[in-house]
């Protein structure tokens, strides 16, 4: 499912930054529990929040979705 695949991709990229879920969520101004549910693939996330995550990871939207 796309939400699970996207969550795995986000987790992979976040872990490369060395930031915890809590610190990354704080960095991008997102609630940690909401962000955790995105990474777990339990959210049908809005495009504006996907963009916020991509910007926080310093990747383009196309790079974020690469391989999905």
Image (cartoon, rainbow, N blue to C red):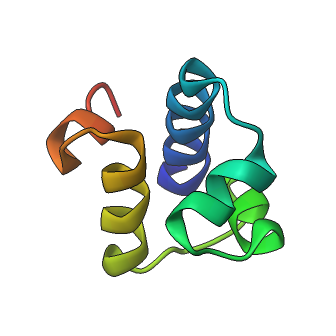
Splitting the image into 4 quarters, where does residue 32 fall?
A: bottom right
Name the one closer to the observer, 29 or 2: 29
Left or right? Give the position of 59 relative to 22: left
List x then y, in percent, for residue 58: 30, 40
List x then y, in percent, for residue 57: 40, 41
Name the one closer to the observer, 17 or 5: 17
Residue 38 visible to an observer of this rendering:
no
Splitting the image into 4 quarters, where does residue 27 fall?
A: bottom right
Name the one closer to the observer, 35 or 26: 26
List x then y, in percent, for residue 49: 42, 74
Give the total number of marks visible in the rendering: 0
Residue 56, above or below 42: above
- Write the residue at 55% across / 26% down: 17
Residue 56, above or below 31: above
- Write the residue at 64% across / 71% down: 43
Left or right? Give the position of 36 relative to 61: right
- Write the residue at 33% across / 79% down: 48
- Write the residue at 73% across / 76% down: 31
Question: Can you say which quadrant of the picture contains the C terminus?
Answer: top left
List x then y, in percent, for residue 25: 66, 61
Residue 57 visible to an observer of this rendering:
yes
Residue 38, above or below 29: above
Left or right? Give the position of 32 relative to 45: right
Name the one closer to the observer, 44 or 55: 55
């Amino acid at each position: 499912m796309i939400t699970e695949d996207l969550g795995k991709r986000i987790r992979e990229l976040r872990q490369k930054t060395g930031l915890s879920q809590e610190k990354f969520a704080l960095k991008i101004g997102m609630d940690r529990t909401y962000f955790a549910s995105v990474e777990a693939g339990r959210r049908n996330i809005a495009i504006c929040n996907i963009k916020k995550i991509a910007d926080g990871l310093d990747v383009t939207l196309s790079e974020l979705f690469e391989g999905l």
